[in-house]
Amino acid sequence: MSQLLEVSGISVSFDGFKAINNLSFSIGQAELRAIIGPNGAGKTTFMDIVTGKTKPDEGAVLWGEMSRNLIGMNEARIARIGIGRKFQRPTVFEDQTVFENLLMAVKNDRNPLAVLFFKPKPPDLAKVEDLAAEIGLSDHLARKSGELSHGQKQWLEIGMLLAQDPKLLLVDEPAAGMTLGEREHTTDILKEAAKTRAVVVVEHDMEFVRRLECKVTVLHEGAVLAEGSLDHVTQNQDVIDVYLGR
Ligand SMILES: Nc1ncnc2c1ncn2[C@@H]1O[C@H](COP(=O)(O)OP(=O)(O)OP(=O)(O)O)[C@@H](O)[C@H]1O
């Protein structure tokens, strides 16, 4: 299988401290991957590099069949070529309904006023309905987003990102603050999304990672410490020493 994203030998230092240290990582077109690792391992910095927020001092970040180099591209351009990022805190428009939030995302205009003057066409409406079904909010389309539970807001934001049809979706700690039921539903959404695109999930919650049933990459001190199934990496003595055993 050809790789969608191929990161090789990236390093970045902040004031002399190597936050990412010769890190290599790759993911295929329709693959789900969990990234785990202790605080300060470099997980956020890694995502910052892939999305163009941080420029590495060394290494290559290659994208797609043409192996385009993403280093030096700005964040907006990287988003346009198909990399979506879900931050930890949901950023939906609370005064807008679920329907309006999804429609704004389909239209790719995150301006609450735009939706007032927008006459959606049948394909847009069909897409909103499909997205709502995918994230399990079909029965909540008319509700103000501010009334949703924390988990439902997270799903809505995932839906808004999926509206852009990203080829790669990066998701930062989705399980935080969710009930068990919400976590289970979130794993279902992410597994489904990864059937047609690459999805990278950074998460500390090991039960959540187990339910994802995917390959796991363990980061430590800015580099890959171990990679493989969850059972494989959790039996690795280095992983136990630096992460699990603490
Ligand atoms: N802009 C910055 N300036 C200085 N140091 C930074 C900067 N960004 C990250 N760091 C440092 O780089 C290291 C890696 O941080 P990063 O946030 O990527 O880790 P993480 O694995 O995401 O941690 P966590 O699980 O706590 O979110 C940390 O020691 C952090 O303090």
Image (tube, rainbow, N blue to C red):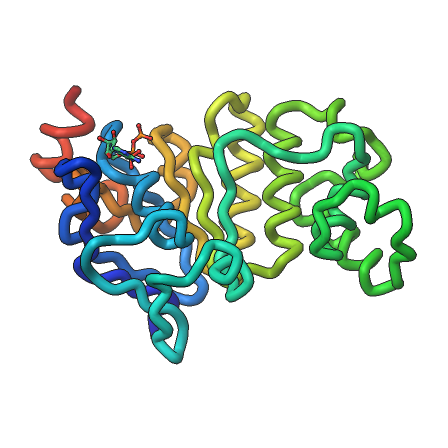
Residue at the spot x=37%, y=54% of the render?
Answer: 50
Q: Is residue 139 left or right of residue 74?
A: right
Q: Is residue 165 left or right of residue 10?
A: right
x, y percent for residue 116:
89, 45
Q: Is residue 207 left or right of residue 103?
A: left
Q: Is residue 202 left or right of residue 129?
A: left
Tell which of 177 and 18 is nearer to you. Answer: 18
What is the residue that sits farthest to the bottom in this orientation? 66
Q: Is residue 232 visible?
A: no
Q: Quadrant of the N terminus?
A: bottom left
x, y percent for residue 47:
36, 47
x, y percent for residue 238:
8, 36
Residue 75, above or below 42? below
x, y percent for residue 111:
75, 44
Residue 87, above or below 169? above
State the count of labels.
Answer: 0
Residue at the spot x=71%, y=26% of the render?
Answer: 148
What is the residue that sits farthest to the front in this orientation? 15
Place residue 101 in its image quadrant. Answer: top right
Q: Is residue 16 visible?
A: yes
Residue at the spot x=52%, y=56% of the render?
Answer: 76
Tell which of 40 and 138 is nearer to you. Answer: 40
- The quadrant of the picture showing ligand 1 is top left
Residue at the spot x=79%, y=41% of the render?
Answer: 112
